[in-house]
Every structure is written in structure tokens, then in C-alpha cells.
Image (tube, rainbow, N blue to C red):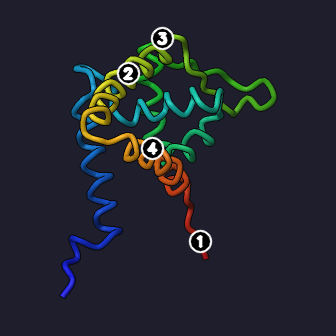
Amino acid sequence: MRNPQDEPVTLLLRGIMSLSRRLRAERPAGSLSLSSLGILGTLHRQGTLVATQLAIAEHLQPQSLTRLLVDLERSSLIVRTRSESDRREIRITITAKGRKALIDDIAARRAWLEAAMGSMLTDRERKALLAASLLLLKLAAHEPLVV
């Protein structure tokens, strides 16, 4: 009988989860929450967004997003402004300080990952992993059809 632990999808899941835990452990002391970093990362990649767009992009409920935005704004990592065209809309922009916080956090984890890849993987394995990263991003963007 086949062991479910050895099935390809289970192995992939275990690998992703183990690497994710390890990368979280490599974060700098006093780092922002992962949710806050996710918000900053989305704003860094996509530019200024309306709060509803940001909530959708981050898979957050509006109430949760509001609490996170208050903390990020207090820390001067984002700026919230009212839309000129629709005064009900709040536009959110990452600040230079927010970009630096994001880049500093990523730098620590990137350094660990580069060192681990350099010492644990062959050139061929590194190339395969980098190719797989595009596939992982594609999977992460999957939205199931709602019937």
C-alpha cells in the first residue's frame, strides 16, 4: 500500500510549508507581521490601490485590513488619501519608509535562501528550483471557479 506521505502533492505541500516556516524564522528581530509585509509588498508591486482592491489582493476582510492600515499609517509606512473622483474611496500608497522596511525584511530572508541554495543544491537543482518558482507563483494566483 502506498504511503500518503510519499504522494507527490503531499511532498510538494510539505516542502513549501517547511521552507515557508524556515523563511519566517530567518526574519529580522522586531519585523512587521506577515500580513503587514504582504500589504507593503502588494503596494510596492502594484502601486497605489483603493482599499477594496487591496483587501481582495491580500485575501483580507475589510475590517482586518482597516486595523492593519491604521498600524502601518501610524508607523509612516503607508499614506491613505481620499480619492478626488470619489470621496468615499481611500487610496493607499506605500511610503519610502515602507519600501525600506519591506526591502530590509526581504534582504534577510533572501541572504539565508541564497546561502542555502548555494551550499545545498547543485547548479542543475538551482535552475530547476528557479524554474519551479514561476509555476508556484502561477498556482498561488489560482482562483477557483465559484458556482
Q: Residue at x 24, y 29 (%)?
A: 26
On the image, the x and y values in percent for residue 144 come to 55, 67
Q: Is residue 142 above or below residue 121?
A: below
Residue 10 found in image quarter: bottom left
Q: Residues within 10 Å of mark 2 (few under 14, many from 20)?
A: some
Mark 4 or mark 3: which is in front?
4
The disc at residue 146 is 1
Residue at disc 4, secondary structure? helix
Of badges 1 and 2, the one in the foreground is 2
The mark that comes first in sequence, 1 or 4, is 4
Kindly identify the amino acid type of the residue bearing the numbered disc 3: Lys
Q: Quadrant of residue 123?
A: top left
Residue 49: x percent and y percent?
A: 65, 32
Real-space Cα distance between discs 2 and 4?
A: 21 Å
Q: Are marks 3 and 2 in contact (CB under 8 Å)?
A: no
Q: Nearer the viewer, mark 3 or mark 2?
A: 2
Residue at 34% from the left image edge and 29% from the top image edge: 114
Alpha carbon distance from label 1 to label 2: 38 Å
Q: CA distance from mark 3 to mark 2?
A: 15 Å
**Residue annotated with mark 2:** 107
Q: Residue at x 35, y 68 (%)?
A: 9
Measure the alpha-carbon separation of dots 1 and 4: 36 Å
Outermost residue, right direction?
85
State the residue position of label 3: 97
Mark 1: secondary structure: loop
Q: Residue furthest bottom?
A: 1
* Residue labelled with disc 4: 127
Are dots 1 and 4 in contact, CB under 8 Å?
no
In terms of sequence position, does the residue under pointer 1 or pointer 2 come before the other? Answer: 2
Crowding at label 4, few (<14), some or many (≥20) Cα neighbours within 10 Å? few
